[in-house]
Image: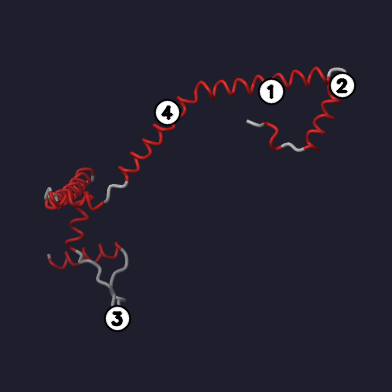
Amino acid sequence: MNIFSNIGITELLLIFLLALLVVGPERLPEMARKLGKLLRDARQAYENLTRDLGPELASLQKTTQELRESVESVRSIPQDAVKSVVKSAELDETIAELKSVKDDFGQIGQTLDDAGKAIKDPVGTAARAAKSTVLPAKPTEPEGEDVADTPESEAEIADVTQAEQGDEQ
């Protein structure tokens, strides 16, 4: 623990001159003695702590290193070992079955969502169902064909549907 390792001669002279100006020539030797004693006491306290806590710190460092090595050994288990365990336990079929069950639950969830929407808005659901059965899906328009006589808006579609129903009666 060397405090003055990065301080050169010029910096020391500058610090000495500033201390001389701030403290004055009469009190400067007394302040230097106090500073020296303070630094000596701090160094001695540091050395005592290092001597007393040294074995404990070494033990902690050793335990930490052992823990790191254990974690690394667990991380380094090859993926092939995991695959061989799955294969030897014949879990491939079970995994495939679980995936199909998951897909089935997804379809059930979608059906329940649709049923919930139908319960919340029965009239709208019935109207959409009727519209999808009465009107065919819009075909993609091939290039070059004239589509001028096809209705563009939902209002025109409704008018055409009502006209067709009137013709049937």
Among the two numbered marks 2 and 1 on one chain, the one whose residue lies closer to the N terminus: 2
- As displayed, is residue 11 above or below residue 155? above
Among the two numbered marks 4 and 1 on one chain, the one whose residue lies closer to the N terminus: 1
In this view, the mark in front (1 or 3): 1
Q: Are marks 3 and 4 in contact (CB under 8 Å)?
A: no
In this view, the mark in front (2 or 4): 4
- Front residue (pair 77, 102): 77
Q: Tell me where residue 17 sits by quadrant.
A: top right
Q: Which percent across, then down, holds residue 62?
A: 41, 33
| Amino acid type assigned to the residue bearing label 4 in the image | Ser
The residue tagged 3 is: 145
The residue tagged 1 is: 39
- Front residue (pair 72, 45): 45
| Amino acid type assigned to the residue bearing label 2 in the image | Gly
Say what secondary structure mark 4 lies in: helix
Where does the C terminus fall, quadrant-wise? Answer: bottom left
The residue tagged 2 is: 24
Q: Which percent across, then down, holds residue 20?
A: 85, 25
Q: Are marks 4 and 1 in contact (CB under 8 Å)?
A: no
Q: CA distance from mark 3 to mark 2?
A: 105 Å
| Amino acid type assigned to the residue bearing label 3 in the image | Glu
Among the two numbered marks 3 and 4 on one chain, the one whose residue lies closer to the N terminus: 4
Q: Residue at x 84, y 24 (%)?
A: 22
Q: Which mark is residue 59?
A: 4
Q: Give left or right: position of 143 versus 81.
A: right
Neighbor class of circle 2 (other Cα within 10 Å; few <14, some 14-19, many 20+) is few
Q: Give left or right: position of 27 versus 162.
A: right
Neighbor class of circle 1 (other Cα within 10 Å; few <14, some 14-19, many 20+) is few
